[in-house]
Amino acid sequence: MNLAPGQLDTLFTALGDPTRRAMLERLARGPATVTELAAPAGMALPSFMAHLRRLEAAGLVTTRKEGRVRHVELVPGAFTPVRGWLEEQRALWEGRLDRLDDYVTRLMKERDNGTGPED
Amino acid sequence: MNLAPGQLDTLFTALGDPTRRAMLERLARGPATVTELAAPAGMALPSFMAHLRRLEAAGLVTTRKEGRVRHVELVPGAFTPVRGWLEEQRALWEGRLDRLDDYVTRLMKERDNGTGPED
DNA sequence: GCATTACTTAGCCATTGCCCTAAGTAAAGC
DNA sequence: GCTTTACTTAGGGCAATGGCTAAGTAATGC
């Protein structure tokens, strides 16, 4: 259940482009065909398809071809590793604040009863 | 309070590199000097400094120079726009599921009392 | 069956990203 | 004051990214 090394790299950089984020925003509202998806992007199809391939490579979307039309949809839990990393960071940060808080609390107690922080 | 256009680009791509994420993970535990931060990275200092500048440009860290030493620390709310975007995506996705759920519920009711979905 | 639609492949080009070495500067240490 | 330390600046290489046009393929529509 662990994530592949480099998966966060692929995910974060996939999210680092406005065209690709716009695609995901659109897809969050439901599946679409390549043509539908590409319309608002305002770029040549081959350029657009490269973005789509990037999202697919990152595991953020899946595509299937029916006849000459390719349908695209979001992969449900695909953001999880990203969220996970951000949560870890928050936990680290808050852990640090907690320890800082403990430390300050201890210092104040020590000041009150005259014992110092030395061993 | 709105975010600058392109800020998400800068943030996400800043997070898309393992060296930079490692720096942030280290900094979540507390401030550090450049030398301390660079030690585990295993690369030449100039290369490392470029990563640091990326993080600073993205607004994820701040640095100040004291004498010949540069100190680096996390900017507290810097992940907020990233979290925010992810939350929006989730809301969109769940909104869609809600509507799907409503739809299915309505269909079932209609089937039960014999009224069809046609106008 | 011929035209249209919906990609797909191929190839080019400019910019950016990520790494390097070499040499410079400026504060601390002795 | 000379050395060491901690960056900093300058410049170079090479791959990846993000865009393009032109031409190909394969399914649909008429």
Image (cartoon, coloured by chain):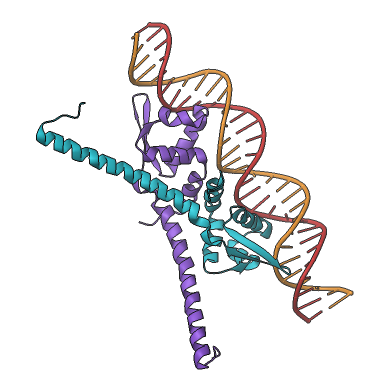
Chain colours: A cyan, B purple, C orange, D red
Horizontal and vertical percent position of residue C24: 48, 19
Quarter of image, res D6: top left
Q: Quadrant of residue D21?
A: bottom right
Left or right: residue A65 versus residue B93 is: right
**Is residue B53 visible to us here?**
no
**Residue in the foreground of this view, choosing between A103 and A1:** A1
Q: Residue at x 60, y 68 (%)?
A: A32
Viewer-closest of D18 and A85? A85
Q: Is residue B16 placed above or below A110 in the rendered structure? A: below
Question: Is A26 displayed left or right of B95 in the figure?
Answer: right
Q: Residue furthest left?
A: A113
Task: Give the quarter of the figure containing the C terminus of chain A.
Answer: top left
Q: Residue B9 location, x and y as percent?
A: 50, 50
Which is more toward the observer, A108 or A26? A108
- The single residue placed furthest to the bottom in the displayed view is B114
User: Is residue A25 among the parts visible in the rendering?
Assistant: yes
Q: Is residue C29 above or below residue C6?
A: above
Residue, x 53% and y 55% (percent of image)? A18
- Tell me residue B109's x, y (percent): 48, 87
x 52%, y 49%: residue: A12
Place residue A33 in its image quadrant. bottom right
- Residue A39 lies, in percent from the top left, at 61, 66
Location of residue A84 with respect to B25 vertically, above or below: below
Q: How many marks?
A: 0
